[in-house]
Image (cartoon, rainbow, N blue to C red):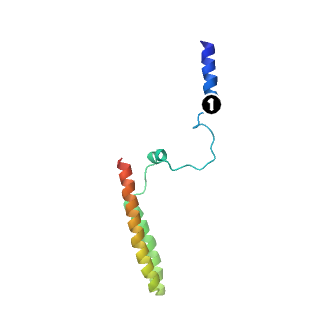
Amino acid sequence: MLMDSARRYLLERAEPDPRERADDSPPRLTLNALEKIRMSRSRERILANLDEMYREAFARAKETGDNAQMATLDFAYRREQLYFEILLDVRDALERR
C-alpha cells in the first residue's frame, strides 16, 4: 500500500499541472479570465470621460477658429459615443449572463 501511494505520487508529479508551470507569455483575455474580472467603470463614467476629452479638444479648435477641426471633432465624438454605447451594451449583456 505504501509503494502504491509512492508510485501514484511520483507518477502524478511526473506530469506537471499546466496551471503550475511558469509562463512568461502575457495574460490572455479568455472567457474564463473575463468571468473573473468585474467591470469597474460605470457607463456614466466612461461616457463622461469621452465627453470631457472631446469638449477640451473642441474648445481648443474653437479658440483657433478652426471650423474644419470643429466639424471633424463633432462627427468623431458622435461616432465614438455610438461605438462605446454598443460596447457597453455588449458588456452589460455579458455581465447579466
- What percent of the width, then of the height, locates residue 64? 48, 86
The quarter in which the N terminus is drawn is top right
Residue 53 x %, y %: 46, 71
Give the image quarter of residue 8.
top right
Q: Is residue 11 left or right of residue 32?
A: right
Instruction: Report helix, strand or loop for mark 1.
Output: loop
Tell me the residue at 59%/37% (across/down). 18
- 51 lies above or below 1: below
Q: Which residue in the structure is indicated by mark 1?
A: 15
Residue 91 position within the rendered picture, expressed as x and y whole percent measured from the top left: 39, 54
Report the number of numbered marks: 1
Is 32 placed above or below 43 here?
above
Q: Nearer the viewer, residue 70 or 31?
A: 31
Give the residue type that dot 1 points to.
Glu
Farthest residue, direction bottom: 65
Residue at screen point 38% across, 60% down: 43
Note whether 67 is above or below 85 in the view shown: below
* In this rendering, position of residue 71 left or right of residue 21: left
Q: Nearer the viewer, residue 64 or 76?
A: 76
**Residue nearest the observer in this picture, 45 or 78:** 78
Looking at the image, is 7 positioned above or below residue 59?
above
